[in-house]
Amino acid sequence: MHIRFWGVRGSIATPGKETVRYGGDTACIEIRCGKEILILDAGSGIRKLGNEILKEKPQHINILFSHFHWDHIQGFPFFAPVFNKEYSITLVGERKKNFTLEQLFTAQLMLPYFPISLAELDAKISFREVSKDDSIVINNVTIKIARLNHPGGCIGYRIEYDGKSFVYATDTEHSSSIDKSLFELSLNADVLVYDSNYTEDEYSGKIGSSKSGWGHSTWNQGIKIAKAAKVKKFILFHHDPTHDDKFMDNLEKQAQKEFKKSYAAYEGMEIIL
Ligand SMILES: [Zn+2]
Ligand SMILES: [Zn+2]
């Protein structure tokens, strides 16, 4: 399993000299399992990934969505393979209330928000609706899904291939006890990518206003899960737009004191399992 981070920022893209090392693009992770291409979320980071994929022979692509807040979908219409008829792309995610997955993307690409409609995209787009506790198989890859705690709902993914496992749990708020479904999803995982948007002081309101109920968590809470679930490597993800490079360096150092194999995700970061 070959993993590459293309966007690690939460909420909104944050370009600029203060974020040049960790990167300013929003959520997008590429995972290669043999020939299979899986992409987690289509934040603004997916644009550059699309340009790389176009250099290869056309193939099938799966994009797995955690949920549909802007920072996780806004790169989708800028993902170059959607404008190439030799590609087929399956969008995987949860339907929301009365909306099917297809209706959600039809709405994203609707006037006056975007000039090109979903039907006008050249790639063959298909939809695969999933829900919490589902387990799906795509060739030799098993994907397990669990409910996270986020306004409007969000799901986490565990990707298993060739005896290795990678867990993606962004956009989730902790409670006073360890989230049972996230614990089970993370059990013995090689890697846990976790919503580390806030510091404990930001979350509690010691700095600024309290962020309780906003749907995000802290690295401290993530490490509790990592330790309990015997995760091998912990990745801080969904960096707050106000957390610049210096700030992130410091967070990574603090996290490593609690859990040695902690790393703050940055654009271009690669993990090979
Ligand atoms: Zn987000
Ligand atoms: Zn969100």
Image (cartoon, rainbow, N blue to C red):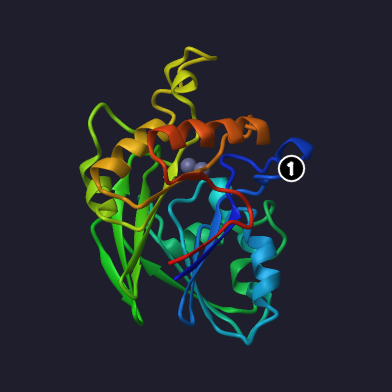
- Where is residue 63 drawn, in percent x and y? 49, 66
Q: Nearer the viewer, residue 101 or 268?
A: 268
The answer to whether 267 appears left or right of 226 in the picture is: right
Q: Is mark 1 within 8 Å of ligand 1?
A: no
Q: Nearer the viewer, residue 67 or 239?
A: 239
Q: Secondary structure at mark 1?
A: loop
The answer to whether 127 appears left or right of 137 in the picture is: right
Q: Quadrant of residue 152?
A: top left
The furthest residue to the top: 206
Q: Say if 1 sits above or below 85 in the image.
A: above
Query: How many numbered marks does the figure carry?
Result: 1
The furthest residue to the right: 17
Q: Quadrant of residue 148?
A: top left
The answer to whether 249 appears left or right of 54 in the picture is: left
Q: At x 43% / y 62%, what residue is drawn?
A: 101
Image quadrant occupied by the N terminus: bottom left
- Where is residue 38 drawn, in percent x and y? 48, 70
Visible in this render: residue 211? yes
Visible in this render: residue 173? no
Q: Residues within 10 Å of mark 1 (few under 14, many from 20)?
A: few
Q: At x 69% / y 52%, what residue is drawn?
A: 112
Q: Nearer the viewer, residue 11 or 83?
A: 11
- Where is residue 185 drawn, in percent x and y? 27, 53
Residue occupied by mark 1:
15
Q: At x 46% / y 80%, what residue is drawn?
A: 34
Image quadrant occupied by the C terminus: bottom left
Label 1 sits on what residue type? Answer: Pro
Q: Say if 31 sits above or below 56 in the image.
A: above
- Where is residue 130 drawn, in percent x and y? 32, 63
Q: At x 45% / y 17%, what residue is drawn?
A: 210
